[in-house]
Image (tube, rainbow, N blue to C red):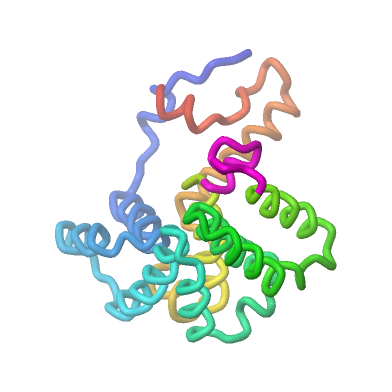
Amino acid sequence: MMDFDPRVYENVAINDNDVRNIVLSYLVHNCFKETAEALLTGTGMQQSVDYLSDLDKRKAIFHFALEGDALRAIELTEQLSPALLEQNEDLHFDLLGLHFVELVCSKKCTEALEFAQAKLTPFGKIQKNVEKLEDFMALLAYEEPEKSPMFHLLGSEYRQSIADNLNRAVLALFPWTMAAHANLPAYSSMERLIQQATVTRHYLHQELGKDGPPPFSLQAFLKS
């Protein structure tokens, strides 16, 4: 399989402002407000101040979800847009599931069971939710849920994925305010570049076989 020499790219000109804008879009997209402000100050980049207030709203919602305080994240989201979670039942269910998990982790099993019956079971009309609900309920059977087969539901990566999905839903809802000022769609510029590189290398690999480039691996690229 053909290996690519990094020196091939040495003569490709990259505009510094483009790189800064890509980094800025990632920081704003992921609610790193202080770092974004430091980048703007340090580089002298011009940026509308409107995005800062929008970012504060998203940051609060994002971090409540990330920290497992799903009810507060839901409350703030509904204040921002009452229809957002109504229109995205999968996300709503996942957020309610986060609260259930927090109750289980706090050993409030009776409260967790009552919450599941009141808030989670109405979503059980969809098969994929039934499967998730079964996993949630199975946590109650373990004295130490973190040692159960469903331990991933208690982990930071699971909360991160739901917080990311919520953040994208908010960005998609208000593209003309929250996204426009920082040139942000539901995915940051950096994520889209990686997605494009992955797809392009995948098709080249399929088309050219052993004479083409290997499939793109971000981990391998970072190590090169």
In which quadrant will I find the C terminus?
top left
* Residue at far top of view: 1
Image side of residue 189 versus residue 1, left or right: left
Question: Residue at 74% of width from left, 28% of height from top?
Answer: 206
- Give the residue displayed 51% in from the left and 20% down from the top: 4
- Of 138 and 221, the residue lying toward us: 138
On the image, the x and y values in percent for residue 68 come to 46, 60
| Residue 217 placement (x, y as % from top left) | 54, 30
Q: Nearer the viewer, residue 77 or 28?
A: 77
Residue located at (72% from left, 54% from top): 132
Going by the image, does 100 lie left or right of 117? left
Which is nearer the eye, 112 or 135? Answer: 112
Look at the image and say whether residue 196 sits in the magenta stretch: no
Q: Please give the name of the residue rendered at 54% of the width and 16% of the height, measured from the top-left corner.
A: 3
Quarter occupied by residue 91: bottom right
Coordinates of residue 78 in the picture (x, y in percent): 53, 83
Q: What range is drawn magenta here?
A: 141-154
Quadrant of image for the N terminus? top right
The answer to whether residue 46 is above or below residue 160 is below
Callout count: 0
